[in-house]
Image (cartoon, rainbow, N blue to C red):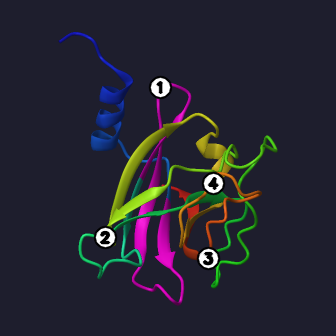
Amino acid sequence: MTDITPGMIFADILRNDSPEAAAWIRGNAQYPQLSGIVKFFSTPYEGVLVEAEIFGLPHIVTEFSSRFYAMHIHETGDCTLPFDKTGGHYNPANEAHPYHAGDLIPLMENQGYAWLSFYDRRFDISEIVGRSVIIHKMADDFMTQPSGNAGEKIGCGVINTF
């Protein structure tokens, strides 16, 4: 095969490159077992490759569980418990929800573990350093303004250069 697709390049980036920025996620007081990392990689396509790996999501003890959790970039990088100083979703273009630059793809967990990777052109890494990644207790409904009715902030990590 001689054709190279963006997906092949993305797989190589995830396998061989170091991220430019990352957020180490920690859980709130109710979910101290929650942890993980969200990494941000540059791509040759003027977008960002995002990889998230989260452990200890609330349904870890429920055998064969599978649930969705909202994941957003928030304005402020202050993960002081109870994560109430993170501000709203990162939204430089003042878009309605779910079109904020900070509205990320939901996490789908399987018995407390979630991994995902996706490509996004709505922000540059330089724009999000110092902000926070928030994991919410519920799925984003993609309708309710301004933040999708995703519930309690159960995980938080500040985005720092790597």
Task: Rate crowding at label 4 as few (under 14), some (14 to 19) or many (20 or more) other CA atoms within 10 Å.
Answer: some
Which label is found at residue 27? Answer: none
Foreground mark, 3 or 2? 2
Amino acid type at mark 4:
Val
Residue drawn at the location 45% of the way across and 86% of the way down = 32
Amino acid type at mark 3:
Glu
Residue 146 visible, this orientation: yes
Task: Rate crowding at label 2 as few (under 14), some (14 to 19) or many (20 or more) other CA atoms within 10 Å.
Answer: few
| Distance between mark 3 and mark 1 Cα atoms | 36 Å
Residue extending farthest to the top is: 2
Can residue 146 be found in the magenta stretch?
no
Q: Is residue 79 above or below residue 54?
A: below
Which label is found at residue 44? Answer: 1
Residue drawn at the location 30% of the way across and 17% of the way down = 4
The percent position of residue 21, horizontal first and vertical second, equals 51, 52
Q: Earlier in the sequence, mark 1 or mark 4?
A: 1
Residue behind mark 3: 152
The percent position of residue 24, horizontal first and vertical second, equals 47, 67
Amino acid type at mark 1:
Pro
| Dot 3 and dot 1 residues touching (CB under 8 Å) | no
* Span highlighted in magenta in the image: 23-51
| Dot 3 and dot 2 residues touching (CB under 8 Å) | no
Q: Earlier in the sequence, mark 2 or mark 1?
A: 1
Residue behind mark 4: 129
Q: Is residue 44 above or below residue 115?
A: above
Foreground mark, 4 or 2? 2
